[in-house]
Image (cartoon, coloured by chain):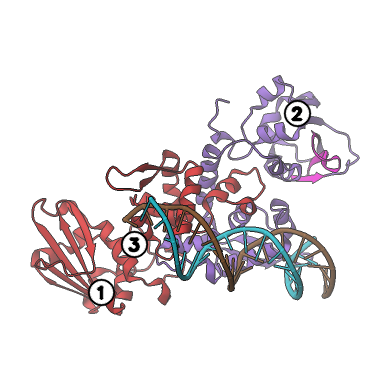
Chain colours: A purple, B red, C brown, D cyan
Amino acid sequence: MSKSQNYGQFCPVARAAEIVASRWTIIILRELLAGSTKFNDLRNGVPQMSPSLLSKRLSELEEAGIVEKTPMTKGRGFHYFVTDSGKELSPIIFTLGIWGQKHVLSEFSKHELDPTLLMWDIQRRIQILLFPEKGRFVAEFLIKGAPAERRSWWIIVHDRNVELCLQHPGHQIDLYIESNLRSLTNIWMGICSIEAAKKEKKLSLSGNDKYIKNFSKWFLLSPFAEYYPGQN
Amino acid sequence: MSKSQNYGQFCPVARAAEIVASRWTIIILRELLAGSTKFNDLRNGVPQMSPSLLSKRLSELEEAGIVEKTPMTKGRGFHYFVTDSGKELSPIIFTLGIWGQKHVLSEFSKHELDPTLLMWDIQRRIQILLFPEKGRFVAEFLIKGAPAERRSWWIIVHDRNVELCLQHPGHQIDLYIESNLRSLTNIWMGICSIEAAKKEKKLSLSGNDKYIKNFSKWFLLSPFAEYYPGQN
DNA sequence: CAGTATCCGATGCGATACTG
DNA sequence: CAGTATCGCATCGGATACTG
């Protein structure tokens, strides 16, 4: 977006790319389009990015008319959200993701496996509407192979809200999910089916039968999972 | 695409962006998808890029399975073309262009106006099939406001081929097109209609009546022209 | 013509620290 | 929590020259 990022061409592909193809920008848009609005929620989606750069990118997107912000009703800070113009980028980014899912090597290098990112993504896709409005559901995830302080996660569905935390919430656990980082990532990405993972002992579910049975109903996979070209 | 360009995320959007969102890459793909295959034809489409960087990008795209090359049947060098995987990027890039045409400010800064690029684009869209197979058609373009050595252009359609040149080809001229750089660019981009430009004396056609009449039939505008949101 | 090699400067961006 | 400011290095890529 800076001077040197310009292509000096009148072609609209070039002019769009100047805005959208700068480093991290597409990833930020993915997060915004997935529904994150708060600065630190966005950070969760791009943990490798420095906050100053995130801040800069958000300003640039605002400048380009793709993002708007409004002060938060309570507390300080802003809600960030895409404008109508930004929403029109949604199919482009989604299709790019499908392309990636189909054509980029589907093995993950070690530094791409990140339990925090994974759990954040998972949490966002939990189908809260499938849980009773009253009452509380608590799932405990144990991710073997993850660093100790990020091995155990709890997801709580309560009051039509999802919460992800790294501390035992104290409530009774309805479901235990046990896997390892690579397997759970592969499941999430559609590279390995839930059934296959269970059979191969890469995934184990225990606890309340009802939740085990309906696991694949409320535990949705990545939106790109279904485009994985493999046989599973 | 280098180490530092990686996002360290398993998300396919990120992994696709690592490949596709590096500087110039989208523009090169646009050129390839538009049908250019030779190194120097590609250069015509990205004149601001150094040949070494173009060469590097082509290698990277090859590495990523998006581009392939085959030795030219005559002469040295290679033909570059997109693989099937690369072709699947076509709708993404096209849609990105449409987005740009709709949402990026449609005024062009001076350094974006480039007669060479414009004529190269125009030449590529000439509908050769509308010209008799035998015989020759020659159009002379006069682009006022362009630097002296790139003011006069000739497009020759002959034998189902188009040729663009900067020297008078010697043959008789069938049609004279006169405009200025900004107006012709605006016409090409669909920002100003041919009719409107004629009325406002921003475009003048003279020569063989037959070719004047059918001008808009064989002189196609940019593929993005029809998406310009203005009233024209 | 069809690229490659080298050099070097600008700048993007990562790390860290800081503020209301 | 919600960002901003600063610093300094790595690297990207532009310019130029060179080769078969």
Q: Nearer the viewer, residue A22 or B94?
A: A22
On whether residue B71 falls in the magenta region, the answer is no
Provide residue A57's location: percent of width, then percent of height. 63, 64
Above/below status of A133 relative to D10:
above
| Badge 2: residue crowd in 10 Å (few <14, some 14–19, many ≥20) | many
Q: CA distance from mark 3 to mark 1?
A: 15 Å
Residue A132: which disc?
none
Q: Nearer the viewer, residue A157 or A169?
A: A169
Q: Which residue is mark 1?
A: B197
| Badge 1: residue crowd in 10 Å (few <14, some 14–19, many ≥20) | some
Above/below status of A146 relative to B117:
above
Is label 2 or label 1 in front?
A: 1
Residue located farthest toward the right when viewing the structure as drawn: A170
Label 2 marks a residue whose chain is A
Which of the two discs, 3 and 1, labels the residue nearer the N terminus? 1
Describe residue B222's horizontal placement relative to residue A177 as left or right.
left
Q: Residue at x 68, y 65 (%)?
A: A55
Q: Residue at x 55, y 25 (%)?
A: A231
Q: Which residue is mark 2?
A: A211
Q: Amino acid at mark 3?
A: Ala
* Magenta residues, start to end: A141-165
Q: Secondary structure at mark 3?
A: helix
Q: Which residue is mark 3?
A: B225
